[in-house]
């Protein structure tokens, strides 16, 4: 049991270590999940209603730009010292 705990601990450490490829993969998965949630929430198939809700759509666009900027920083902004 102790061997499995140590293996699991090593896997977790490699996932969150900045010089590991798994750190990039985890951050990319987080970015992808948040982007999918934003895209699905903004999607509106009715063009007439989307024209009326222009203010709401612009708010979602601003939120998406801020979130995507933050997530790109999260994905590529770390530097290993």
Image: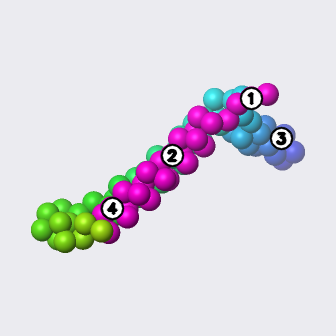
Neighbour class for label 4 at 10 Å: few (<14), some, many (≥20)? few
Based on the picture, tell me whether residue 59 belongs to the magenta stretch.
Answer: yes
Q: Tell me the magenta residue range.
A: 56-81
- In the visual, does 75 lie left or right of 52? right
User: Decide: marks 2, 1 in contact (CB < 8 A)?
Assistant: no
Marks 3, 1: nearer the viewer: 1
Give residue 13's quadrant in the image: top right
Q: Tell me which label, 2 or 1, sits earlier in the chain.
A: 2
Mark 1 or mark 4, which is nearer the start of the sequence? 4
Colour pattern: rainbow
Say which element carries label 2.
helix
Label 3: element kind: helix
Left or right placement of residue 30 versus residue 1 in this view:
left
Residue at image mark 2:
69
Q: Is residue 75 above or below residue 1?
A: above
Residue 48 location in percent, x, y?
12, 68
Looking at the rendered structure, the secondary structure element under dot 4 is helix
* Residue 33 spot, x, y in % from top left: 47, 51
Q: Position of residue 27 (x, y in %)?
A: 59, 42
Q: Going by the image, does 54 lie left or right of 72?
A: left
* Mark 4 to mark 1 CA distance (whole Å): 37 Å
Residue 52 position by quadrant: bottom left
Pick the quarter of the image with the C terminus.
top right
The residue where tag 3 is placed is: 6
């Amino acid at each position: 049991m102790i061997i499995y705990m140590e293996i699991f601990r090593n896997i977790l450490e490699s996932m969150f270590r900045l010089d590991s490829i798994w750190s990039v993969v985890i951050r990319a998965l987080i970015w992808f999940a948040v982007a999918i949630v934003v895209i699905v929430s903004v999607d509106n198939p009715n063009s007439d209603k989307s024209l009326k809700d222009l203010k709401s759509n612009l708010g979602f666009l601003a939120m998406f730009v801020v979130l995507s900027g933050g997530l790109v920083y999260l994905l590529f902004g770390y530097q290993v010292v």
